[in-house]
Amino acid sequence: MSAAAAGLAPLLSHAGKKGFATNNTSTPLNLGIAGYTFSKSTIPQAIAMMQRVNIKTFSMKDVFLPLNSTKDKADEVVNTFKQAGINIYAVGVIYMKTQQEADQAFDYAKMVGVDMIVGSPNYELLPYVEKKVKDYNIRLAIHNHGPEDKSYPTPEDVYLHIKKLDKRMGLCLDIGHTQRDNIDPATAYLKYYDRIMDMHIKDVDVANKDGKDLELGRGIIDIPSLIKALYKKGYTGHCSFEHEKDPQDPLAGLAECVGYFKGVCNTINVNTHSTTISIN
């Protein structure tokens, strides 16, 4: 009990200060949800869950809009989210193994109306994809997928392949897969921050290939350290929650992740400043 009281002390000591409220839901970071979280949900179900956790930006997975969709279908899906107050800021993860698949990915992103693809192109396609990035002015954030990924297991693998390419080609840092490679996500962010365009936020139980998804704060990732690193470098991309523990019923776990993340953000703000910052 003494330890718990000590942990609450910084919050309690600032609770009466101007600009801080215990029910504050804003953060200095842009929060979103990665579409894979809702891989087993319908669009109305996904929208309802986003509204429940009060997050209004979405990285759309093709489960909601197949890559070969028509423009009319794309407009219908985008407008459904828009009418619910949700902005689609990116699409993906999209895999690209051929030039035709790269063409399709960029046409798809243009049709949806986003300026970023979260993707995973084959190495030999990178010069062709760089040309597409320039032609379309659409960014590509390559996603690291952990120990099983033959192409981009770690953030370093992504960085080494894009560091000399157009600056609109960067990383989508998946902190769970990064930790599964036994790499501290905060350290990885600080090392590659200038090319990190997007982030997938989750927790894992162990730092190896067998690591499983958990609610934030229940696993081994040092979330406060990561958030401090993001503040330090002024991260302006999205922190998108990707909760995969129970795809059939993701709401409870997702809500816990969002609440924990916002709580850590606000606690760090309170302990650093006399008022909280609202940029969300």
Image (spheres, rainbow, N blue to C red):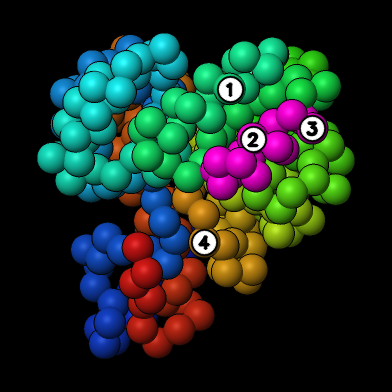
> Which residue appears farthest toward the left when viewing the image?
83
The residue tagged 3 is: 127
The residue singled out by tag 1 in the image is: 103
**In screen coordinates, is 269 left or right of 77?**
right
Separation of disc 3 and disc 4 at Cα? 27 Å
Q: Answer left or right for 30 relative to 210.
A: left
Residue lying at the far front in this picture: please name it.
135
Q: Which segment did they paint magenta? A: 126-142
**178 or 13, which is in the foreground?**
178
The residue beneath circle 4 is: 236
Q: Is residue 107 visible?
A: yes
Q: Nearer the viewer, mark 4 or mark 1?
A: 1
Q: Give the amino acid at mark 3.
A: Pro
Of the image marks 4 and 2, the number of the one nearer the N terminus: 2
Q: Earlier in the sequence, mark 1 or mark 2?
A: 1
> Whole-percent x and y of residue 125?
76, 23
